[in-house]
Amino acid sequence: MRQAGNYDLVIANAVGSVTSSPAMPDVRFILVRVNGQPAAGTNTAASSATVSISGGYPNGFTFYTLDRSPPTTSSLFFSDPINLTTSAIMRALNCSIALTR
């Protein structure tokens, strides 16, 4: 489990890097539904399942994987419910970007 408190954000690219002032992360939960029902742990459907994701940051971006790998901003982008016809382990990430000057 991660410790509560302030963290620094480091952004780097080929030109260099910059470190933010200490900031408190804003963590929010997302809700995954399978066939309209909240999903928790293992969920089973007879033949196929419609999976939707909601919550997190308003106007945020949701990314997901179906192969147990951790999602990143390069993962599949979630915009509409998806239909699964085979077994999958879904992991999701919802993020929002706030830029200040």
Image: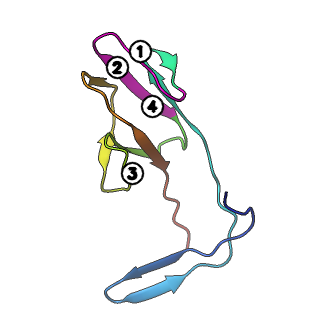
Q: Which residue is mark 1?
A: 35
Q: Main secondary structure of the magenta part?
A: loop
Q: For mark 1, does the 10 Å Cα neighbourhood hold few (<14), some (14 to 19), or many (20 or more) residues?
A: some
25 part of magenta stretch = no
Residue nearest the viewer, comparing 68 with 4:
68
Q: CA distance from mark 1 to mark 2?
A: 5 Å
> How has the structure been colored for display?
rainbow
In this view, 52 is above or below 89: above
> What kind of element bears circle 2?
strand
Amino acid residing under circle 1: Asn
**Tag 2: Cα neighbours inside 10 Å, few (<14), some, or many (≥20)?**
some
Spot occupied by residue 1 in the image (x, y as percentages of width and height): 67, 57
Q: Answer left or right for 2 relative to 37.
A: right
Q: Residue drawn 75% across and 66% down?
A: 5
Residue at x-position 72% and y-position 70%: 6
In the displayed structure, 97 sits above or below 78; it is below
> What amino acid is found at the position of numbered circle 3 in the picture?
Pro
Q: Nearer the viewer, mark 4 or mark 3?
A: 3
Tell me the residue at 47%/43% (across/down).
Answer: 59
Residue 43 is inside the magenta segment: yes
Name the element at disc 4: strand
Q: Position of residue 83 (x, y in %)?
A: 28, 22
Residue 53 marker: 4
Q: Earlier in the sequence, mark 3 or mark 2?
A: 2
User: Toward the viewer: 2 or 60?
Assistant: 2
Q: Are marks 1 and 2 in contact (CB under 8 Å)?
A: yes
Snapshot quadrant of residue 8: bottom right
At x 65%, y 60%, the residue is 25
Q: Which residue is mark 3?
A: 71
Quadrant holding the C terminus: bottom right
Q: Is residue 9 above or below residue 36?
A: below
